[in-house]
Image (cartoon, grey):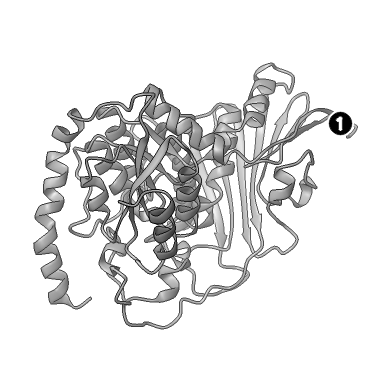
Amino acid sequence: MKQENRREFIRKNGKRTAGLWAGALVLAKGKKAVSANDKVILGAIGLGGRGQSLVRGFALRKDVQFAGLCDPDLRRPKQLFEMLKSEHNPDLTLTDDYRRIIDNKEIDAVVVATPDHWHAIPTITACQAGKDVYVEKPASHNIWEGRKMLQAARKYNRVVQVGMQTRSAPYAQKALEYIRSGQLGPIHYCKIFNMKSGSPYKEGAVGPIPKEMNWDLWLGPASMREYRDGIARGGWLYYWDYCGGDFGNDSIHQIDLARMLIGKDYAKSVHCTGGNLAFNDDREVPDTQAATFKFDDMVVTFDLTQWAPYMAKIPMAMRESDQFPYWPQSATRVELYGEKGLMIVGRHGGGWQVFTNDGKVTAQEYGRFPDDIHKENFIQCIRSRERPNADIEEGHRSAILFHMGNISYRIGERKLLFDPNAERFIGDDDANRLLKRDYREPYVIPDNV
């Protein structure tokens, strides 16, 4: 975008953005809960692969109707929009600006499935406008904005469900019951794995901004950069400006599952090492990471690869059947070492098994993919006003762990001590500077949300 065009955009939209923050309290006070007999009216912000999957899944429900869809790249949702307009709601609207969704007073709740750097702003503004939120994982791009998301949810009494579906899985709840029964014994060591295959990343050449792409809005709070199609089409996963790498984007599922099972909130310290060791490509984030978190009575480790062809996620067919994966090559597992046994758990299905010292399986539970159950929980909480299974507070605390690990890595692989009350690092200014990003005008989150 040319500099004069950028200044003109800020001139036209900056006051409007500020007004949206300032006027949100009035809107929130006027919003009523959805009754049991009414359809929940949804709007969707972010229509990439995951966003379209969520929209299609919610749209299958008879108690839901979409009123608006939004994506800054209008090339992506055309087919979905035409299908939903024909089969779901003839009055459905499509826009490139998330603020049109927030402003729509007909909408009760929004589904946010943007790249990670765009999770906080629409979540906070939706809460301020009296709307509930289903926001994809990870909850936040940084620790500071995660706290602001939580503050907004509580201040405006909003239901905010994070897309960490395993919290809604019956098999995961049964694993938690087993641990709480004492049959595994006290747990002092937990290992979290996100060891997957992958390929080198090349960011591609600078190109003209497509006419159907609002590049300024896509960048949002991130710094201005020239358009590259590869970044907008999935390459954002490899840049600190938009994401925490796979440590945050995908591993958050295992991190949250582990945190739920061990019953911990904040780690006391972290040390993370790694690098771009396999590919030496254009990514900013590492392709290999190892982190150690210390809790009062437990050590938790995390291991990541993006290049190991012999590691794989549990196939979807296996998640929908009475089968267990071959655990040593299960890429996204959690291992819990109790004094009486070892529990290995899969995320998003895959189930769990408990092993003793002779290799005998003493307990097990098959798993199922919990996506629909998680949506059901969100819709029911919109009606009941109860906290959802993956409430924003749980999403925020789980995200803090991977943020801690990435910060340790980015400042030279230093060990860091963490103050959970202040949500700050102890005695390390370099680390604390990464608690919050630099927000580009007009996409700024105020201190008082």
| Nearest to the observer: residue 372 or residue 64 | 64
Number of dots carrying numbers: 1
User: Where does the image place residue 51, in percent across and percent down from the top left?
Assistant: 45, 53
Going by the image, does 145 lie left or right of 236? left
Tag 1 secondary structure: loop
Is any atom of residue 120 visible in this view?
A: yes
| Nearest to the observer: residue 233 or residue 373 | 373
| Nearest to the observer: residue 132 or residue 312 | 132
Q: Image quadrant of residue 224?
A: bottom left
Quadrant containing the C terminus in the rendered view: top left
Q: Amino acid at mark 1?
A: Asn
User: Where does the image place residue 377, in percent across and percent down from the top left?
Assistant: 49, 30
Quadrant containing the N terminus in the rendered view: bottom left
Task: Identify whether 254 is placed above or below 297.
Answer: below
Q: Which residue is mark 1?
A: 357
Q: Residue at x 51, y 77 (%)?
A: 202
User: Where does the image place residue 238, in percent across and percent down from the top left?
Assistant: 47, 65
Is any atom of residue 294 visible in this view?
A: no
> Furthest residue to the top?
181
